[in-house]
Image (cartoon, rainbow, N blue to C red):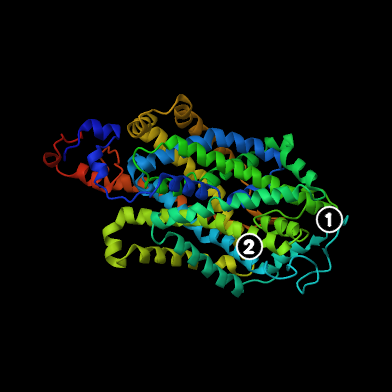
Amino acid sequence: KGRLSLSHLYSGNFPMELRLNISRPTWSRQIEFTLAGIGCAVGLGNVWRFPYLCYRSGGGAFLLPYLFMLLMLGIPLLHMELSLGQYMRRGPVHKPYFCLFSGVGMASVAISFIMCTYYNVVITWALYYLFSSFQAPLPWQNCNNTWNTPNCTNHATNSSYTSTASQEFFKYVYGVEETGVLRLELFLILILAWILVYLCIFKGVKSTGKVVYFTAVFPYVILIALLINNVQLPGALDGITFFILPEWDRLLSVEVWVNAAAQIFNSIGIGFGSLLAMSSYNSFNNSVLKDTLTISIINSFTSILAGFVIFSSLGYMSHLQGIPVSDLAVDGPGLVYVVYPQAFANMPVAQLWAVLFFFMLLCLGLDSEFAMVEVLVTSLLDEYNQHLIAFFKRKELLVFAVCCAAFLLGIPCVMQVGIYVFQLMDHYTAIVSITFLAFFEVIAICWCYGTNRLSDNLEEMTGKRPNIFFRMCWLIVAPLLIGTILIFSIIQFKPARYGDYVFPPWAQGVGWLIALASIIWIPLGAIHTFWVLPESVVVCASSTSVQHFLLSAPENRGVAPLPG
């Protein structure tokens, strides 16, 4: 023991006694990881981002690229991340990258942290609507409120200049006609949202594992009930037709394919490190392929189910306003908070349906939110365990500090015009940054670490090597496909927008700074490698203890020094 051969060094397969010396809690039951993975992947993105990207991309024209990206990118790359997390028993910072790409792990942590700061605002909206649902009548049920305009309508009309009560209520929530003022109600609810996130994760995987039993299952009950109700509404068939029948000319747009890839990355969590961090708490011999297929298939099934629910509601809205589905003014992240409330307003026992639905959104949001926060906590503890515990004394206080920092950074999103701040951050984080990150992650793992090494790792854990489909996707398809998407998305880049409003150049500059906050770690990691090890060729090990072992004196580790 205490010896590491050159064959281990070059193969990337580190002896079991070295990896198992690392203390690591595990899930109480393996089903808890599966449910946590489903809860992490199946989130607000399925009922919030998927529908609005689908609507923006022409409905059915989005489904074909989405399913293609699921098969060629989503499933193979999720299999890759779960395998690495389970084998290395470490968070994203300790992925076994070639040193030149050591910054990819840090970029994963950075993008997860940035996203969790504004993603919790969507949970804040859900809580705001949940509390508002206890009123009778519902505040978005009619146009008799002080915030309604003369253009508000409760009935069908042939004018495209009218708006429904639910559309005007969402505008009222933010008061987009004013600037710079903090919305006190949203601010207080944002505090409550972070308290809920903290209570879900402060005890680590033991508390997370218990929460997911409910949060991962309950949403399906509500979605199925809503679908049964919505298909009976007038105009629902028009919305469903828009959802499933593609406009073939839209498939020539690069933006549609980029949005489809970004949705796969966001929904499944590719590049964010969330599922990788969670899989690091698995037992060593867990069946990775089973979890991969379960998580990815259920995730996409949920998106499509939510698509039928929301587009049937869109058909109902188009019936109310007397205009085509494609002309509805519901683009953007607020779509789910406009369409669903409008459907509830005309349902029996409207308050009950509204309460159940927004509680479901809360469950979906919490699953994904505490997974992103867990990425940062896990990475900090993996890297600086002794120092952090010495300073904070308890892990619970470290989690509290992380939640407080993310809360402070999310405050601009609950100010007046915060919806524009939110949209800007989401565009440059969830679409721009994640595409860059996914490309470099695939290059680092599939080409530098190597498909053969990854296959060896899987064989050591499960006794079986991955089949030819996964190996070809890792080696050829994923790098080339993501690289092509990245190149075309740069060439045909379109600035962020919210509805018909295109952000001005100065706001686009702020957006690029937000994007750089995550992807800058990739070149910084490369520079650090050349600076610290200018004349050496070193393969980075996955854990700090192994790195220390490799860099110790040759006579202490029983191997010959590397040439040069």
Q: Nearer the viewer, residue 138 or 162?
A: 138
Horizontally, residue 317 falls left or right of residue 75, namely right
Give the x, y percent position of residue 41: 52, 47
* Residue located 59% across and 38% down the image: 488
Q: Is residue 411 visible?
A: no
Q: Under tag 1, what secondary structure?
A: helix
Amino acid type for the residue under numbered disc 1: Gln
Horizontally, residue 244 falls left or right of residue 38, namely right
Mark seen at residue 321: 1
The residue singled out by tag 2 in the image is 419
Give the x, y percent position of residue 331: 70, 53
Q: Is residue 147 visible?
A: yes
Horizontally, residue 260 falls left or right of residue 228, namely left
Horizontally, residue 365 falls left or right of residue 560, namely right
Q: Residues within 10 Å of mark 1 (few under 14, many from 20)?
A: many
Give the x, y percent position of residue 304: 64, 42
Question: Residue 260 is drawn in which quadrant?
Answer: top right
Q: Nearer the viewer, residue 189 or 130?
A: 130
* Quarter of the picture holding the C terminus: top left
Give the x, y percent position of residue 176: 68, 67
Mark seen at residue 260: none
Q: CA distance from mark 2 to mark 1?
A: 24 Å
Is 491 located above or below residue 384 in the figure?
A: above
* Residue located 40% across and 50% down the image: 106
